[in-house]
Amino acid sequence: MPERVLICGAGVAGSIVAFYLGKADFQVTVVERSKAEQKAGQGIEIEEPALSVVRHMGVLDTLESVKTGEEGAEFVDQRSRSYGIFKAGGISPTGELELMRGDLTEVLYKAADAHLNVTYLFETTIQSLRQTQDKVIVDLAHRPTRSVKTEEFDLVVGADGVKSRTRQLAMGSPEELNCFKAVGAYTAYFSIPKQDQDWPYSRLCHFPGRKVVWMRPVSKASDVTSVYLIHVGKNVPALSRANAVGDRMKQKEALAELYSGLGWEVPRVIEEMLKAENFYSDELMQVKLQKWSQDRVVLVGDAAWAPTPFTGEGNQLAIMGAHVLAQEISRYRSSAAFDAYEKRLRAYVEDAQNIPLGGYAPYIFVPQTSLGVWVFRTLIYLGSWIVRFIAWRGMPDGSDQQHKEFDLQIEKDETKKAR
Ligand SMILES: Cc1cc2nc3c(=O)[nH]c(=O)nc-3n(C[C@H](O)[C@H](O)[C@H](O)COP(=O)(O)OP(=O)(O)OC[C@H]3O[C@@H](n4cnc5c(N)ncnc54)[C@H](O)[C@@H]3O)c2cc1C
């Protein structure tokens, strides 16, 4: 009988592991607590080396066809005056392959689900988990019917995000593991009705008090625009309380209070945020664990190492990590794979978790005072002209060297198959 693997979470990491294990003839079950693959979220980007994984999966063309088409990022002041434009790619906040998170998870889900030996169970979660010498016994709870089914698996993969239930059940609570490291910032993502000025550039406006509002196009045809609110700060009690209990209305009210009285398009953004359905907000936390596995249970993606958006690596690492994990499971076909996976990836992940500029990047890029915002704008203004000059002269801007090297061993797999 083929080995049975349970994957908890049909996000980015979960569906990539499912795709590759399905391809390697494992019997795969994916449980996802949402009604369908988790489509919530706003824009995320894929660049090398993670791009090689989606290319290898054969989904790059499909992803290209659903990319947002954002042409670049424009920095504006409170009176909508532009002081710097960066075209997509290179050092621009706009990557070359910008996607809506929901489009990415849908494409990955469809690719994995095409394998007959991969089964998705929605509105289902792991209720409890026991490990014996040679298997993992799991109680799977199906929310709509309130039924619980006990099943046995050879291996369990926790791909269930920052607040991973798999991690909690197999290793202990975040407090016991001391694995949450707050970076001192809050964020919220949501969609609002689109207006003409929202296309084709994303627009960022900085405000004193360490606040940013970033509006991003979803696509030319879409009738909505994506919004990110970012606040660098450690103490917003009302927001912390709302985040702790996941109360969306209270989160929105606390954000409305925090952003009240600001200029630019903030009144429009806040008014629409209060009505937004696709809304997500939380305090930014990194996950740092001593070990990513416990016997027959292993973690991947944000569940194992969430790096926060300040690193720009969350999605990259989830894609690469899922590929490496599935590759090692396919090679070893046992939990011995987990040490090999961690050995290959840990140093890369720890390096990627470093917040740029010695951890001060959020404070430098999101200034506290009006003077700080003015200095920041002046630097962006000069920087945008330097980038334009470099592009005009056809000089290399270093962007092709900015991807960190990592050997995904894709070629090795292909050679083995060809033999
Ligand atoms: C709702 C949401 C919106 C996001 N929006 C953005 C965004 O706009 N921009 C950005 O840069 N990053 C966003 N992220 C984070 C980004 O998706 C991740 O950093 C990155 O893609 C790593 O993915 P992952 O697969 O490890 O984890 P995640 O993307 O967090 O996926 C985890 C999956 O596990 C499921 N899950 C969680 N708990 C359980 C459980 N107990 N049982 C079953 N299933 C469970 C979740 O529903 C989800 O499908 C978002 C994440 C989520 C969950």
Image (cartoon, helix red, strand yellow):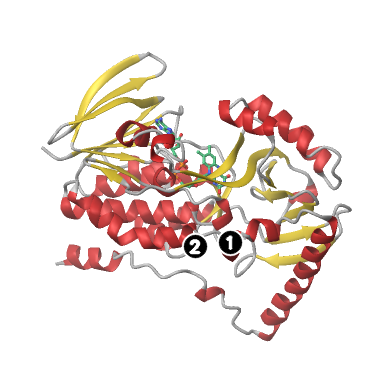
| CB under 8 Å between discs 2 and 1 | yes
Residue 74, horizontal then vertical, whole percent: 75, 60
Amino acid of disc 1: Gly
Relative to residue 331, is residue 102 drawn left or right?
right
Q: Which residue position holds label 2?
A: 47
Task: Report helix, strand or loop for mark 2.
Answer: loop
Relative to residue 180, is residue 325 drawn left or right?
left
Residue 332, horizontal then vertical, whole percent: 16, 53
Q: Is mark 2 within 8 Å of ligand 1?
A: no
Amino acid of disc 2: Glu
Q: Quadrant of the C terminus?
A: bottom left
Note whether 52 is above or below 242 in the view shown.
below
**Which tag, 2 or 1, sits closer to the chain's start?**
2
Q: Quadrant of residue 377?
A: bottom right
* Tag shown at residue 95: 1
Relative to residue 51, is residue 170 drawn left or right?
left
Q: Quadrant of the N terminus?
A: top left
Which residue shows up at 72% across the image and 81% down it? 389
Task: Report helix, strand or loop for mark 1.
Answer: loop
Note whether 349 is above or below 141 in the view shown.
below
